[in-house]
Image: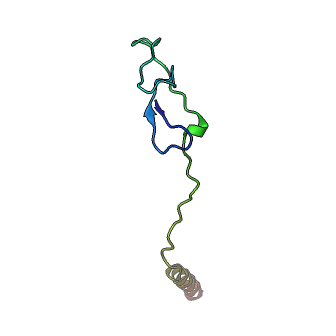
Amino acid sequence: MCYIANGESSGTCRNTQCLSETDCLCSFATATSTATPVYLAEDIPVSTDQPSLPEVGTTWPTILGTVFGVVVILTSLLLAF
């Protein structure tokens, strides 16, 4: 697993069975053992910055289209009677 200690910006390879060893080799670990990596919450950096979305587009085409649609419907109703 990649072990990142508090205050460090980069991590090192560590065996999950012996985190104090820096060379990924444990004196008691066997080559056939399979270990599940354990990640501690304080070892995982978390970004608190939220991205902002740019302001795009305009509303006037929607408003104009809505008004035009209402006028066409009212006109067609008046002509039907």
Residue at 56 percent of width and 38 percent of height: 43
Image coordinates of residue 59 in percent, x first then y, are: 53, 79
Query: Can you say which quadrant of the picture contains the C terminus?
Result: bottom right
Residue at 53 percent of width and 37 percent of height: 5
Is 33 in front, or is 54? 33
Is 69 in front, or is 40? 40
Image coordinates of residue 63 in percent, x first then y, are: 55, 81
Left or right of 32 in this view: 6: right
> In the figure, 48 relative to 68: above or below?
above
> In the figure, 54 relative to 58: above or below?
above
Image coordinates of residue 60 in percent, x first then y, are: 52, 83
Is 11 in front, or is 32? 11
Image coordinates of residue 2 in percent, x first then y, are: 46, 33
Residue at 53 percent of width and 65 percent of height: 52
Q: How is the image coloured?
A: rainbow
Q: How many marks?
A: 0
> In the figure, 81 relative to 56: above or below?
below
